[in-house]
Image (cartoon, rainbow, N blue to C red):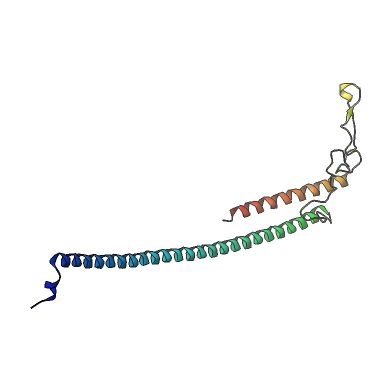
C-alpha cells in the first residue's frame, strides 16, 4: 500500500517542513512587529496627550497669575492715587493754595518750557532767563549783585507749596514703584 509520505521523497519533505517553519516564523515576526509598533504608537500618543494637557494647565495657571497681578497692580495704583489726593488736599489746606496741581494731578502747577534752548524760559518772573548777575567795579566789601529781584513772600509761599507738592509726588511715586516691584 502506498501512503502519502512515501510518495514525496524525503529531501522534499524536509525542504517543505523548513519552508513551512520559515513561513510560520515570518508570520510570528510580522505579528510581533505590528503589535510592538502599535504599542509604541499608543505610548507616543499618550505622552503627546499628556504634554497637551500639561501645556493647557500651564497656560491657564499663567493666565490666572497675570489676572491676579494686573488686579493687584490696579489696586496699588488706586490706593496710591487716593493717598496722593488726600496728601494734595492736606497741602492745599496747609499752604492755602486752592489749585495745587489742579491742571494735572501728577504735575505741579507752573509754566512749561518750550523745550528749545533759546525758547521762552519756564520761569516767567521778572529777570528769569536773564544772564548771570554781574559784579560792579567797587571795593571787595561793597560788592553788589545786579540781577533779578528777590521773590516776594507770595512767590515764596507758592514755591514752598510747589516744592511740597513735588516732594509728595516723589514720595508717592517711590512707594508705588516699590509696591509694584514687590509683586511676583
Residue 74 location in percent, x, y? Answer: 66, 61
Residue situated furthest top in the rendering: 139
The quadrant in which residue 89 appears is: bottom right
Q: Residue furthest bottom?
A: 1
Viewer-side residue, 59 vs 47: 47
- What's the residue at 17%, 66% (across, down)? 12
Report the number of discs. 0
Q: Quadrant of the C terminus?
A: bottom right
Kindly identify the residue that appears in the image at 21 percent across and 66 percent down.
Answer: 21
Above or below for 77 versus 161: below
Q: Position of residue 8 (x, y in %)?
A: 15, 70
Residue 6: percent from left, percent from top: 11, 72
Q: Which image quarter: residue 135?
A: top right
Image quadrant containing the N terminus: bottom left
The image position of residue 98, as x and y in percent, is: 84, 56
Q: Quadrant of residue 69?
A: bottom right
The residue that appears at 65% across and 59% down in the rendered structure is 76
12 relative position to 33: left or right: left
Q: Which is nearer the eye, 50 or 137?
A: 50
Amino acid at each position: 500500500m502506498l501512503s502519502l509520505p512515501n510518495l514525496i521523497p524525503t529531501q522534499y519533505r524536509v525542504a517543505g517542513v523548513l519552508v513551512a517553519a520559515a513561513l510560520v516564523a515570518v508570520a510570528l515576526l510580522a505579528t510581533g512587529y505590528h503589535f510592538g509598533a502599535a504599542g509604541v504608537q499608543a505610548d507616543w500618543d499618550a505622552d503627546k496627550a499628556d504634554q497637551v494637557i500639561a501645556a493647557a494647565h500651564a497656560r491657564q495657571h499663567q493666565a490666572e497669575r497675570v489676572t491676579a497681578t494686573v488686579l493687584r497692580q490696579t489696586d496699588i495704583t488706586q490706593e496710591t492715587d487716593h493717598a496722593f489726593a488726600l496728601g494734595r488736599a492736606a497741602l492745599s489746606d496747609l499752604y492755602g493754595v486752592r489749585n495745587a496741581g489742579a491742571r494735572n494731578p501728577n504735575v505741579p502747577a507752573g509754566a512749561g518750557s518750550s523745550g528749545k534752548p533759546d525758547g521762552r524760559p519756564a520761569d516767567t518772573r521778572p529777570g528769569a532767563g536773564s544772564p548771570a548777575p554781574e559784579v560792579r567795579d567797587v571795593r571787595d566789601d561793597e560788592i553788589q549783585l545786579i540781577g533779578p529781584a528777590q521773590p516776594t513772600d507770595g512767590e515764596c509761599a507758592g514755591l514752598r507749596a510747589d516744592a511740597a507738592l513735588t516732594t509728595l509726588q516723589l514720595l508717592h511715586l517711590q512707594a508705588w514703584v516699590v509696591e509694584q516691584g514687590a509683586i511676583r
